[in-house]
Image (tube, rainbow, N blue to C red):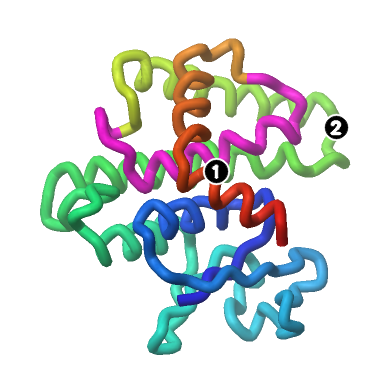
Amino acid sequence: MKLYYAPNTCSLSPHIVLRELGLEFELIKVDNRSKLTADGRDFRTINPKGYVAALELDNGQILTEGPAIVQYLADMKPESGLAPRADSWARVRLQEWLNFITSEIHAGSAPLFNATLPEEVRAFFREKLFRRFDFLEDALNDKTYLTGSSFSVADAYLFTVLGWCEFFSFELNRWPALLAYKRRINARPAVQAALLAEASQ
């Protein structure tokens, strides 16, 4: 398999999952500006959407969209426990979390990357995002991970998008449970290996 990624983007999530599962894969860096891969190809010929992540399977199929990729990977090794069985209520709950992270945290953070927005507009999006952090704080007050006591693909995704806070110049100190959660995920060996690999390419 090949994972197409760019540093400091949502592609870190499937990268973490690949390492948690111990699967063999090739990591291929994509330049988000030029849309060229590290080996000189036009990334848009791989993913016409033009953004990472993209997972190229050994049979040539390309899978895009992080939440779909991480569930596919987890199902390759169901014994890992990174995702519940596809026919279970627990899997529906996992998908609920993945959709929340996608629509409320990932998409909710996107406007803050736009430095040209007036401050009052940025403040609006920032406060909306903070309300979602309030919800996460309550959800994590009595849980180690989003779905309970076990690390899941949803945790890899939330950790990834929480990492963008540093680009917006705000800390998570206002949400102690969320901050502690982020630190727990950061300490995982697979997470550290993924971060190190992306920083060294």
Q: Which residues are magenta?
A: 147-171
For the residue labelled by badge 2, is the local secondary structure a helix, a strand or a loop?
A: loop
**Snapshot quadrant of residue 124:** top right
**Snapshot quadrant of residue 70:** bottom left
The residue positioned 57% from the left and 34% from the top of the image is 162
Image-based side of 182 in relation to 72, left or right: right
Question: In the rendered view, would you say 60 is above or below 73?
Answer: below
**Numbered marks: total:** 2
Q: CA distance from mark 2 to mark 1?
A: 36 Å
The residue positioned 76% from the left and 67% from the top of the image is 31
On the image, numbered disc 2 is attached to which residue? 118
Image-based side of 43 in relation to 91, left or right: right
The residue positioned 42% from the left and 59% from the top of the image is 18
- Asked if labels 1 and 2 touch by Cβ distance under 8 angstroms, the answer is no
From the top left corner, tell me how far across and down residue 48 is, in percent: 61, 78
On the image, numbered disc 1 is attached to which residue? 192
